[in-house]
Amino acid sequence: MSADERSPSRSLVLAITGASGAIYGTRTMAALLERGCHLEVVVSEYGRRLLRDELGDSASIDRLTDYLVLKYGSGVRNGTTTMYSNKDLGAKIASGSQGCEGMVVVPCSMKTLAGIAHGLSRNLVERAADVMLKERRPLIIVPRETPMSLPQLRNMVLCAEAGAMIMPAMPAFYQMPQTLDDLADFMAGKILSALGFAHELYPAWKG
Ligand SMILES: Cc1cc2nc3c(=O)[nH]c(=O)nc-3n(C[C@H](O)[C@H](O)[C@H](O)COP(=O)(O)O)c2cc1C
């Protein structure tokens, strides 16, 4: 589907887990909210820790929207969020009857990757991802680890075989990034493109 062909108010699940690169999660969240999306947000326990460790206390989960507005501007308020506990397996997004059209796990830890790959559904992030796979809806997984073990590599293959898009947190350098924000913009832009959103988070490659 081409960019922005769908309705302006789109509903997606966004999960942030305990891999390094919390900024990829917050930048993606802000960019989707700026576009008027409704986000069902789940942040794992270690995702919460990484938000604070890497972005500071002002990015803690209870102040996350204010943090996004301060950093990315009032456009973030174009969208809406519902926050869930990762322990809440009775949440709406744990069911295939929920209306979200897709899900992004950004960043995705190797632990959550393993849980998704093996359909474990031990928590809400894993269950919501499982729902996306069984309902054949888009699931974008942004893993971050280096180096990777053979089980981790195999888990990415399992997820890809099940229909997920594996989008490693690997920003490019041909855009001449100057700041960490440039790197985060690149990854968020890749995610938005995969979801069919037009954006100018990084300059289009002109060859
Ligand atoms: C500071 C810090 C950085 C971490 N970075 C990574 C990482 O880049 N990739 C990864 O797979 N795990 C990383 N971990 C380990 C995960 O947080 C850990 O496996 C955790 O259990 C993941 O749980 P979750 O997937 O439920 O968030 C890191 C942990 C800490 C404390």
Image (cartoon, rainbow, N blue to C red):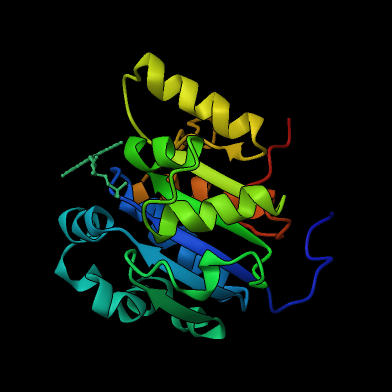
Rendered position, 168 above or below 92: above
84 horizontally vs 159: left or right: left
Residue at (48, 20) in percent of width and height:
154
Residue 206 on image: x %, y %: 73, 36
Quadrant (top left/top right/bottom left/bottom right) for the N terminus: bottom right
Residue at (67, 71) in percent of width and height:
97
Residue 21 on image: x %, y %: 32, 46
Q: Does residue 146 appear in this view?
A: yes
| Residue 33 found in image quarter | bottom right
Residue at (37, 51) in percent of width and height:
122
Q: Does residue 201 appear in this view?
A: no
| Residue 82 found in image quarter | bottom left
71 horizontally vs 203: left or right: left
Q: Nearer the viewer, residue 75 or 14?
A: 14
Residue at (32, 81) in percent of width and height:
66
Q: Nearer the viewer, residue 69 or 135?
A: 135
Residue 113 on image: x %, y %: 42, 38
Residue 78 on image: x %, y %: 56, 84
166 horizontally vs 153: left or right: right
Total numbered badges shown on the rendered structure: 0
Rendered position, 116 above or below 102: above
Q: Nearer the viewer, residue 35 or 17?
A: 17
Q: Nearer the viewer, residue 184 or 100?
A: 100
Rendered position, 154 above or below 164: above
